[in-house]
Image (tube, rainbow, N blue to C red):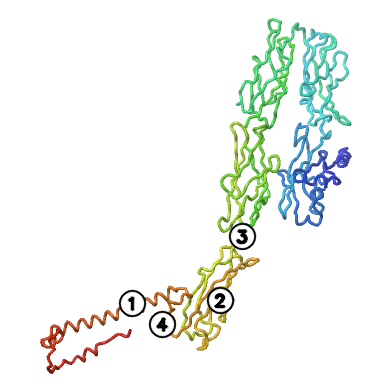
């Protein structure tokens, strides 16, 4: 039977977006693609041709690498055909509970280039759950004095299916003393009431066994049963009466255990033992407790709106004579902002090229908040000043994209903090950090450390001798930053990696004394980037000859040549000062000489007379050592 149902379910699947309507709805594909399938389809069943619905050809499937991004692997994509396949069990009741519409929303991811597509698969309910009573049997005590028409609330069954496949009515096994009435609550749920049809006689029959059957509306319908064991008790004139048939209360989910929910009250007109009432709970589980004397209902443990939103429990009041009355307590749980948003980052690019244009998709961000209403509405943003931004893609789905151009040489990586804040009062927030690495591209040309070089070289250097070295650098990485040198126009030789310039042959007298070289450097990027510098070479016999003519403004000053020039000038000044010191010493010696006639000769008018004069021999002065200037 399950195989036949599976075949029918497989035959009933249908995508919401039909292929022949695809051209009309192509602009909407970026929003969401919807499919509708029955639940419990076998693993491997085809949901729809996703690649075709996205406009992909079969030839581009290997490069686009279409796959599903989801927290739970309900679906997968065939790499050969691009079909969306069922990859795990799809139990609608387990996934969505009692929701009228059960839709699984997730993303399909395509690479090269990276893009996201929003998908929605709605699961249709099938009749795969039968109504089920909480107990296989239940006890009910009815006094023999109970009047015909008296009603008793019976235990209800539960059916996990929805709509027509859910529980529809109850039936009672034939009995002349009892009948069954199907009642319906405001929310549409059905519950049974047992009606006493005639007066009971305990002495004639004190025990009844009936079968209560719950039926759903499936085709064929499924059912569940429980046994009713009715015991007829001795007469008790007045049964207990609750002051309300149905109690309704709202309760915040964050109340602590032990909180009073409400107090139910029943009265009995009898006296003595027959008027003493005790209370008991039915279908309360371990969530609520009841004081059997006061009728006060309290919480037994913490509540969770996200787990169960409402409770319907039955309170029974029993007097001392065995008569009972029942009422229903409906507890509606109110949502509180007690869940922080959960952030999931998917399909994050490991490396972002620095030439990536603004608006490029980097990652998909999913935000999930278990709260409801404003407590579950979330705003996502980036913390701090970074060249990225977040844009909303769909409900609780965001895209992380570049906001401006990147420069790896300035910032090689970014630590991006993603923050999500809900709209609760007070709001709750959470954050997560991702590290984004910026990849290098060849966007920087090599740069010489000097725009031009002036080099002085002695002649007669042997071929291959190193005469100068130029240097350039490139801030790019890897081969993009490896530089190689070349002489663009010259008769001198290559230093490909070091930048050294060598003579290709010996220089002769006919060769020019000055050479102007244009040196180029380029990196290893694709395409390569390059730069040039001017190299001025001067060849001479000696250092003096090699000194530059300061009037030649075409040659830039060289620090080494200037230093040599200042050393020569300083040497000349020292020689002059030494000569002056020698002359001054001779003069002082002559002044202190014993022959006044010699010194008098230097005085004006003293030697005006024509007398023979014999000058002293100062030949030793001429032999004083002199320095070669």
Residue 344: percent from the left, percent from the top? 66, 44
**Crowding near the residue tagged with mark 4, few <14, some 14–19, many ≥20 C-alpha atoms within 10 Å:** few
The answer to whether mark 3 and mark 2 are in CB contact below 8 A is no
Q: Residue furthest bottom?
A: 612
Mark 2 Cα shell of 10 Å, populated few (<14), some (14-19), many (≥20): some
Distance from the alpha carbon under mark 1 to that under mark 4: 15 Å
**Horizontal and vertical percent for residue 87?**
78, 46
Tell me if label 1 and label 4 are in contact, CB under 8 Å: no
The crowding category of the residue bearing disc 3, from other C-alpha atoms within 10 Å (few below 14, some 14 to 19, many at least 20), is many
Q: CA distance from mark 1 to mark 3?
A: 54 Å
Residue 404 versus residue 274 in the image, above or below: below
The tag earlier along the polypeptide, 3 or 4, is 3
Q: Between label 1 and label 3, give the one nearer the viewer.
A: 1
The residue drawn where x is 63% and y is 47% is: 389
Label 1 vs 4, first from the N-terminus: 4
Residue 570 is tagged as 1
The residue that disc 4 covers is 544
Tell me how far mark 3 sits from mark 4, CA to CA.
50 Å
The residue depicted at 64 percent of the width and 33 percent of the height is 375
- In whole angstroms, how far apart are the C-alphas of marks 2 and 4? 29 Å
Q: Earlier in the sequence, mark 1 or mark 3?
A: 3
Tag of residue 495? 2
Of residue 146 and residue 166, the one placed in the foreground of this image is 166
Residue positioned 85% across, 46% down in the render = 19
Q: Nearer the viewer, residue 45 or 519?
A: 519
Foreground pick, 230 / 292: 292
């Amino acid at each position: 039977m399950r195989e036949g149902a599976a075949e029918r379910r497989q035959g009933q699947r249908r995508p919401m977006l039909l292929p022949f309507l695809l051209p009309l709805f192509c602009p909407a594909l970026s929003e969401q693609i919807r499919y509708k399938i029955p639940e419990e389809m076998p693993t491997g069943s085809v949901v729809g041709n996703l690649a075709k619905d996205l406009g992909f050809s079969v030839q581009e499937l290997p490069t686009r690498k279409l796959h599903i991004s989801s927290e739970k692997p309900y679906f997968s994509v065939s790499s050969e055909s691009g079909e969306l396949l069922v990859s795990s069990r799809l139990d609608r009741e387990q996934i969505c509970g009692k929701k009228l519409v059960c839709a699984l929303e997730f993303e399909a991811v395509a690479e090269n280039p990276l893009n996201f597509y929003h998908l929605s698969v709605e699961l249709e309910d099938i009749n795969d759950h039968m109504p089920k009573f909480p107990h296989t049997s239940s006890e009910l005590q009815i006094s023999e004095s109970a009047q015909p028409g008296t009603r008793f609330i019976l235990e209800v069954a539960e059916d996990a299916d929805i709509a027509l496949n859910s529980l529809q009515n109850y039936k009672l096994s034939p009995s002349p003393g009892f009948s069954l009435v199907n009642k319906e609550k405001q929310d549409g749920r059905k519950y049974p009431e047992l009606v006493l049809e005639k007066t009971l006689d305990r002495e004639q029959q004190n025990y009844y066994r009936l079968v209560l059957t719950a039926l759903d509306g499936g085709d064929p319908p499924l059912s569940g049963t429980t046994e009713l064991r009715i015991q007829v008790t001795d007469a008790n004139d007045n049964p207990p009466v609750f002051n309300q048939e149905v109690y309704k209360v709202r309760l915040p989910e964050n109340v602590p255990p032990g909180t009073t929910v409400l107090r139910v009250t029943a009265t009995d007109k009898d006296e003595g033992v027959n008027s003493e009432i005790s209370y008991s709970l039915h279908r309360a589980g371990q969530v609520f407790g009841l004081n059997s004397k006061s009728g006060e209902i309290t919480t037994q443990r913490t509540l969770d709106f996200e787990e169960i939103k409402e409770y319907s429990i039955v309170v029974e009041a029993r007097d001392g004579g065995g008569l009972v009355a029942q009422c229903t307590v409906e507890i509606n749980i109110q949502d509180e902002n007690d869940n922080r948003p959960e952030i999931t980052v998917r399909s994050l690019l490991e490396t972002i090229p620095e030439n990536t244009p603004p608006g490029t998709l980097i990652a998909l961000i999913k935000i999930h908040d278990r709260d409801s209403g404003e407590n579950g509405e979330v705003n996502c943003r980036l913390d701090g000043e970074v060249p990225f931004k977040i844009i909303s893609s769909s409900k609780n789905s965001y895209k992380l994209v570049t906001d401006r151009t990147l420069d790896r040489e300035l910032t090689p990586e970014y630590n991006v903090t993603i923050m999500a804040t809900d709209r609760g009062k007070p709001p709750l927030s959470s954050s997560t950090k991702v590290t984004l690495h910026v990849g290098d591209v060849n966007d920087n040309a090599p740069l010489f450390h000097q725009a031009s070089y002036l080099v002085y070289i002695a002649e007669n250097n042997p071929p291959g001798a190193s005469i100068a070295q130029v240097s350039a650098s490139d801030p790019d990485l890897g081969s993009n930053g490896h530089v190689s040198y070349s002489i663009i126009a010259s008769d001198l030789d290559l230093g490909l990696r070091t930048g050294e310039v060598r003579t290709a042959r010996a220089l002769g007298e006919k060769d020019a004394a000055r050479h102007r070289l244009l040196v180029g450097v380029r990196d290893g990027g694709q395409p390569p980037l390059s730069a040039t510098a001017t190299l001025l070479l001067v060849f001479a016999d000696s250092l003096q000859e090699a000194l530059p003519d300061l009037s030649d403004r075409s040659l830039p000053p060289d620090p080494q040549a200037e230093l040599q020039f200042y050393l020569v000038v300083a040497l000349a000044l020292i020689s002059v000062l030494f000569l002056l010191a020698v002359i001054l010493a001779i003069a002082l010696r002559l002044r202190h000489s014993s022959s006044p006639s010699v010194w008098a000769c230097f005085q004006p008018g003293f030697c005006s007379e024509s007398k023979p004069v014999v000058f002293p021999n100062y030949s030793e002065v001429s032999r004083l050592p002199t320095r070669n200037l």
